[in-house]
Amino acid sequence: MGNKDEAQISEWIVLFANDSWYQKESGIEMEFNGTIYPYTEEPNLILMHDWYYRLDDRKIYISGQKNKVLDDLIGKKVVIRGKLVKMRLEGFSFTEIWPGAVRLA
């Protein structure tokens, strides 16, 4: 990512804050700081719940498809404004970040 791209992403970029699935979640919006990494653990066992990214050791939910903005931020320190959501699906319990917006730290 060049300087121009980094300058553009130093402001908040909306990811899912305007999506109905994000807005319907009653969790409190907060800020999470860390580094974006690709999610490289074992294949997901939960239907319709794929993870492609993590913020340090926390899974990031992105509604089932890769995201260009997050792809460009892999390896970078960021701030995610989002919700920490505890889920229980198909017998599995887990906690994940639902990202509303992101910017460089």
Image (cartoon, grey):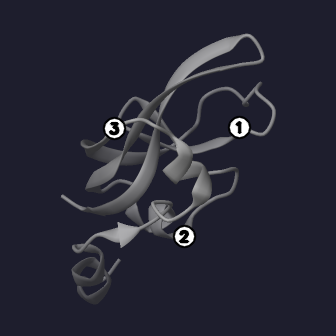
Going from the N terminus, do you reach mark 3 or mark 1 first? 3
Q: Does residue 89 sit above or below 74 in this rendering? A: above
- Which of the numbered marks, if any, corresponds to residue 25? none
Residue 6 in the image: x percent, y percent?
26, 77
Residue 25 in the image: x percent, y percent?
51, 40
Cα distance between the residues tagged 3 and 2? 26 Å
User: In the image, what residue type sits under mark 1?
Assistant: His
For disc 1, the marked residue is 49
Q: Residue furthest top?
A: 91
Q: Residue at x 57, y 63 (%)?
A: 67
Residue 96 in the image: x percent, y percent?
49, 32
Cα distance between the residues tagged 2 and 1? 18 Å
Nearer mark to the viewer, of 3 and 2 = 3
Going from the N terminus, do you reach mark 3 or mark 2 first? 3
**Residue 100's image quarter?**
bottom left
Q: Residue at x 63, y 59 (%)?
A: 66
Residue 41 visible, this orientation = yes
Residue 77 in the image: x percent, y percent?
25, 53
For disc 3, the marked residue is 28
User: In the image, what residue type sits under mark 2?
Assistant: Lys
In the rendered structure, the answer to whether residue 51 lies left or right of residue 25 reads: right
Q: Residues within 10 Å of mark 1 (few under 14, many from 20)?
A: some
Q: Residue furthest bottom?
A: 4
**Residue 12's image quarter?**
bottom left
Q: Residues within 10 Å of mark 2 (few under 14, many from 20)?
A: few
**Mark 3 secondary-structure assignment:** loop
- Which of the numbered marks, if any, corresponds to residue 68? 2
In the picture, the quarter occupied by the N terminus is: bottom left
Nearer mark to the viewer, of 3 and 1 = 3
Q: Residue at x 50, y 63 (%)?
A: 71
Residue 61 visible, this orientation = no
